């Protein structure tokens, strides 16, 4: 038993070292995309902090979800946050599974580049939306009479830049349409839907996403419209951006394509080069070395083709 454990531990260590070397190479190529995505997370937090200064507490708006779902109460608001934390942690652990398991379908660095692209696009739309119209927050700390409903004028720029993390994030007001929690949840679920391998986990993930939506409304952290808009906006964002990004490389292949598609200039240059090769009678595929001969405006494969074409023309 001891010998078996030692042998398996040695294999696991070699697997981790090998995967680490691979991911480091990918990180060196794609660190700019990851850094840009991480920086935008701070910008998103800064924007949410800024709209809190503009928040005007008022009566809670009429909401269908509030009418249908019983209010959980202030003492049970942690339930939705706990579920979201489990979703976030589960996805992070899954994204690093290639370091441990033999069966691998993804590269961790490339998956996070893709996820951050989805998040940045969705959060950019969110910032535009909640700055366009500020709704009175339905959460308990955002209602009339709460000391946290409005922020006093900042004493310095640093007070705004530091966004009072994490308290400023947890007790924010005004950043309603659309739900940031649902952005993360749906991006994670859609990513696993495409690259995950366990069907039962995919079905469970969608069930968790629906449950998360209901809990957010029942906790009065968002209006129902915030959740509904998140559902169709995030799905559309992921759909269109996923079309623009190239597919992740297969783990069975050693080829690693570029993260981003070719620019229009590169595509035009490549197309011209291929057309020139065709005009010269050369194959686009360099592995195809067969000679071409042009007769009567037609490119033939070899000399035998010349006689056949000549015979068919009655020459």
Image (tube, helix red, strand yellow):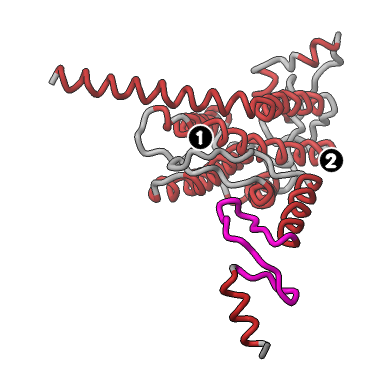
88 displayed left or right of 60? left
Q: Identify the residue under disc 1.
A: 107
Q: In front here: 135 or 289?
A: 289
Image coordinates of residue 279 in percent, x first then y, are 75, 62
> Viewer-nearest of labels 1 and 2?
1
Comes first in the chain, label 1 or label 2? 1
Q: Identify the residue under disc 2.
A: 133
10 displayed left or right of 197? left
Residue extending furthest toward the bottom = 314
Q: How many marks?
A: 2
Residue 161 visible in the shown view: yes
Residue lying at 62% horizontally and 46% vertically, measured from the top left: 246
Judge whether 183 appears above or below 57 on screen: below
Query: What secondary structure is marked by label 2?
Result: loop
Judge whether 298 appears above or below 197 on screen: below
Q: In front here: 42 or 208?
A: 42
Residue lying at 37% horizontally and 25% vertically, measured from the top left: 15
Q: Is residue 216 magenta?
A: no
């Amino acid at each position: 038993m001891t010998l078996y454990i030692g042998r398996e531990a040695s294999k696991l260590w070699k697997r981790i070292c090998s995967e680490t070397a691979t991911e480091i190479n990918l990180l060196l190529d794609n660190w700019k995309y990851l850094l840009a995505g991480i920086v935008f997370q701070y910008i998103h937090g800064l924007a949410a902090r800024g709209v809190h200064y503009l928040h005007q507490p008022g009566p809670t708006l009429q909401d269908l979800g509030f009418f249908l779902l019983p209010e959980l109460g202030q003492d049970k608001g942690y339930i939705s946050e706990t579920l979201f934390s489990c979703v976030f942690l589960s996805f992070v652990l899954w994204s690093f599974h290639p370091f441990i398991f033999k069966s691998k379908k993804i590269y961790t660095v490339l998956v996070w580049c893709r996820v951050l692209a989805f998040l940045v696009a969705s959060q950019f739309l969110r910032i535009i939306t909640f700055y366009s119209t500020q709704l009175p927050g339905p959460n308990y700390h955002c209602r009339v009479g709460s000391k946290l409903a409005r922020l006093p004028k900042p004493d310095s720029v640093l007070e705004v830049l530091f966004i009072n993390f994490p308290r400023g994030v947890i007790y924010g007001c005004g950043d309603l349409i659309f739900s940031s929690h649902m952005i993360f949840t749906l991006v994670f679920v859609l990513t696993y839907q495409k690259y995950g391998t366990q069907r039962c986990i995919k079905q469970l993930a969608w069930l968790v996403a629906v449950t998360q939506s209901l809990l957010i409304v029942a906790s009065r952290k968002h209006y129902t419209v915030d959740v509904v808009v998140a559902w169709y906006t995030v799905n559309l964002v992921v759909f269109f951006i996923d079309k623009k990004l190239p597919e992740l490389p297969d783990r069975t292949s050693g080829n690693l394509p570029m993260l981003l598609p070719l620019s229009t200039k590169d595509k035009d240059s490549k197309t011209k080069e291929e057309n020139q090769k065709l005009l010269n009678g050369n194959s686009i595929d360099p592995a195809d070395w067969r000679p071409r001969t042009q007769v009567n405006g037609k490119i033939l494969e070899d000399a035998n083709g010349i006689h056949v074409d000549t015979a068919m023309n009655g020459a």
